[in-house]
Image: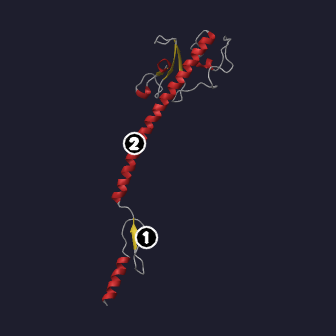
Amino acid sequence: MKEKKKNIRWIRQAHHKYGFTPLEVHQIGETSPLGRLFLTGFTMVELMAVLIILGLLMAVVVRNFVGQTDRARVITTKANLKILHLAVNQFKMDTGRFPNEDEGLSVLIVPPDDVVNYPPDGYLDTTDLPPDGWGRDFVYILYPESGKSFAIKSYGADGEEGGESYDTDLLSTDAN
């Protein structure tokens, strides 16, 4: 009789379920004829700890990625300014004059009517003028306030004159 009560109690315990998730797993090494089932899973504290760690990692990655993108746009803009500046100087050496502000940078890919020694492929490797890092056109300025012969300007991230950090204006005379 004592053995029968012990088995009934053990069977009730064997069907008692623990945990929070519906994943049922047999206990390893159990000798019960019915098998013992447990619900296994993570506690709420463990889940919150993982979510907090993932959130912190994502914040660091996003912050670093955004900074790298803006810095890459500035570097691309400076490189394009340098290419355009050299092309305008080459135009000056070949023709004896700088492009006027009406012609702008388009003379680097389309020959003006009064130029004789214009190279057949133009002064750029492409058939289009490169944009700045933010996808906007550069501005050509003949005899700017800096006292230089010309300058090519990008208005930075905000697209407006002036600004600080990534919004600052970039000039071809500064990139050299």
**Mark 2 crowdedness (10 Å alpha carbons): few <14, some 14-19, many ≥20:** few
- On screen, residue 74 versus residue 5, left or right, reads right
List x then y, in percent, for residue 165: 41, 27
Q: Residue at x 33, y 87 (%)?
A: 3
Quarter of the figure with residue 96: top right
List x then y, in percent, for residue 144: 49, 13
Q: Is residue 102 in view from this perspective?
A: no
Q: Amino acid at mark 2?
A: Val
In the current view of this chain or complex, which residue is farthest to the top?
A: 96
Rendered view: 58 above or below 40: above
Secondary structure type for disc 1: strand
Q: Is residue 57 in view from this perspective?
A: yes
- On screen, residue 106 versus residue 41, left or right, reads right
**Residue position for label 1:** 25
Q: Residue at x 52, y 22 (%)?
A: 81
Residue nearer the viewer, 113 or 34 = 34
List x then y, in percent, for residue 108: 62, 19
In the current view of this chain or complex, which residue is farthest to the bottom?
A: 1
Quarter of the figure with residue 131: top right
Q: CA distance from mark 2 to mark 1?
A: 38 Å
**Residue position for label 2:** 60
Quarter of the figure with residue 121: top right
Mark 2 vs 1, N-terminal side: 1
Number of labels in the image equals 2
Q: Amino acid at mark 1?
A: Val
In the current view of this chain or complex, which residue is farthest to the front?
A: 29
List x then y, in percent, for residue 149: 52, 11
In the current view of this chain or complex, which residue is farthest to the left?
A: 2
Secondary structure type for disc 2: helix
Mark 2 and mark 1 residues within 8 Å of each other at the beta carbon: no
Quadrant including the N terminus: bottom left
Q: Residue at x 53, y 20 (%)?
A: 139
